[in-house]
Image (spheres, rainbow, N blue to C red):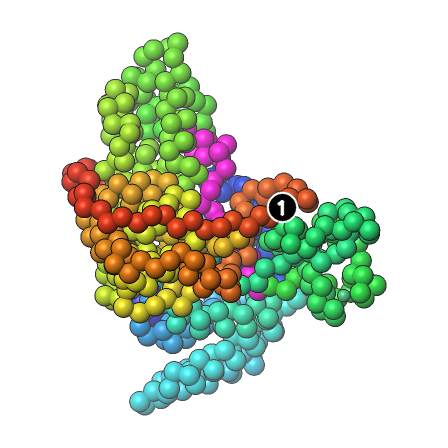
Amino acid sequence: MMHSALAFADGTSSDIYRDLYDWFLAHPVFERWYQGSPWQLHCVGGPGSGKTTLAALVSEHIAKSKHFSRSIVVHVSVQHDVCARELEFLEDLLLAIYQELESKSEENDEDDEDSEDLFDIYVQERQKLGGCRVSRRIQLLQKAVYSCLANLPKSSHVYLVLDGYDRCSLTLKTLLDNELSALQQKDLSIFITSRLAVYENIESRCDHLNHGGAPDDDPIDLEDREVLGLCLECQVCEDIMCFPCRDAGRICRKCGNNDGLKEPYEFVNIRIGQIPNDQMTKYITWNLEREHGDLKLGSSAQKPPLSILGESLLAESTLNTAGALVERILDLALGDIGLAKARIDLVHEMESISDMEARRDQLPANILAMFDAGLRKLEGRSPEEKDLGLKAVAASGRDITGVSIPVMQRWLHQSISEDTRSGEDILEATNGFLFATTGDAIQKIQVYHTSFYYYVAKRHNLNLFEADRRLRADNARRMSSFAEVQASAASQVRFEPRDVPAEPAERTPFKLQRTVTAMDPIMEPIDDGPAHPFILRKGTRAWN
Ligand SMILES: [Zn+2]
Ligand SMILES: [Zn+2]
């Protein structure tokens, strides 16, 4: 029996729009990963961003791919939060990998007796009267799995797709990181989905004299060079070289050759929260037409006869009402698939376009309920975590462009029982509602979506409102000078995920990275109450 949180994932459901993640599967970073990269691929997206669907599509894609003559995919998912029995979780993950490798070995493979013997020892120890301790069970399983991987024919390649890594406690993540890193060394390709990006405080810039095509006598100042998502490091002299420099034929100047160049990181993040507009438009039109019939939007959906709303949308044939509706959903979703779905669900409930106009400027009840459900998960944690989580979310509602981590910490530390040690603690406590920005001189923490910002700022949630009120009161009482924060922030480290944007932006080589001074917004205690109470409607989606 497996740990209750761990399960083999089922394939994709038939009710998905399969083309939504084509951009991801065609992404050069994804392609490099599945052709056997030396790093793990971490796919990061906020609540409801479609990570599970993507994991299923990735498994399918690999299984069909012809890059290796045989691809074995171990696809497991973490079903719920794991805060206890973490070592058993690790044991069962290894067990799942071993069993998949065994069951997917082909009959004509030579029997891998070494691994089977090792596995038998594990089974015997586990079944011993009174059992054997967990660390020994894990060691025995590791031996069996590693041996199995080492004995696979060269033409085979093994992938581990792990969905829901963010549901693991920080302790378990640390255990898993070690194990995944060891598995990666044994040539297993690892794909993870998570709400949170893993932290790193490495900031790499290209060291090459001619970076950006600059001549020898006029190189770009190091601090003016862009921070690199992907890069190479010379193992001999430790100089960093960017891929464009390597591809332009530049050579490590200290060593006179490029033999030592290696990618120096263990993982690469791709954010999936931002679906490109053209894919999103196709998704919205598909979803509308499969429900309301042929709205002349030209989607690939199987179209039923026109619904009442469908007829209403087509009534004024001169106006492109359906097209305008698509545009409107696109604008409000801002690339987020979860919010696009919620908006479309609302449309499905309506009978005419005037219903829609009546509430165009409110946050709809199903989206409010979605956010409420997400926050209830934070509230279910330990009192300290709950306090930190709610106050951090409340504080993030003070600035839509984000709050710098030192300022956020200062606010929080005046109000919570135990100080945070890093931005990581804040992000862990807020479970994907907040994320750390990249590219700011002082890294900021920001709400994951504009709609969520309005939810926070307009005080739609009573507990959040209460947390905000207490935070403001504590801050007002203990206000110290801003200069003090700046001084304490001077020696900060960065917690920057190694990040590849969904659509790689054109890099201007001479772009300046200017230092931005963090502004400390004036904090006044506020006393106005929460926004109007709201009523739950049908069609509300469970979301956590
Ligand atoms: Zn360069
Ligand atoms: Zn070198």
Q: Is residue 111 left or right of residue 18?
A: right
Name the residue: 23% across, 55% down. Answer: 473
Name the one closer to the observer, 414 or 209. Answer: 414
Name the one closer to the observer, 455 or 530. Answer: 530
Range of magenta residues: 266-287
Q: Is residue 169 left or right of residue 439?
A: left
Q: Is residue 296 magenta?
A: no
| Residue 448 showing in the rendered view | yes
| Residue 109 showing in the rendered view | no
Q: Which residue is mark 1?
A: 512
- Residue 211: where, in percent of width, then height? 74, 51
In which of the image's four quarters is ligand 2 placed?
A: bottom right
- Label 1 neighbour load within 10 Å: few <14, some 14-19, many 20+: few
The amino acid sitting under disc 1 is Leu
Q: Is residue 272 magenta?
A: yes
Name the residue: 52% across, 80% down. Answer: 143
Q: Name the image quarter holding residue 92.
A: bottom left
- Residue 347: where, in percent of width, then height? 29, 29
Secondary structure beneath dot 1 equals loop
Q: Is residue 66 left or right of residue 197?
A: right
Q: Is residue 68 above or below residue 505?
A: below
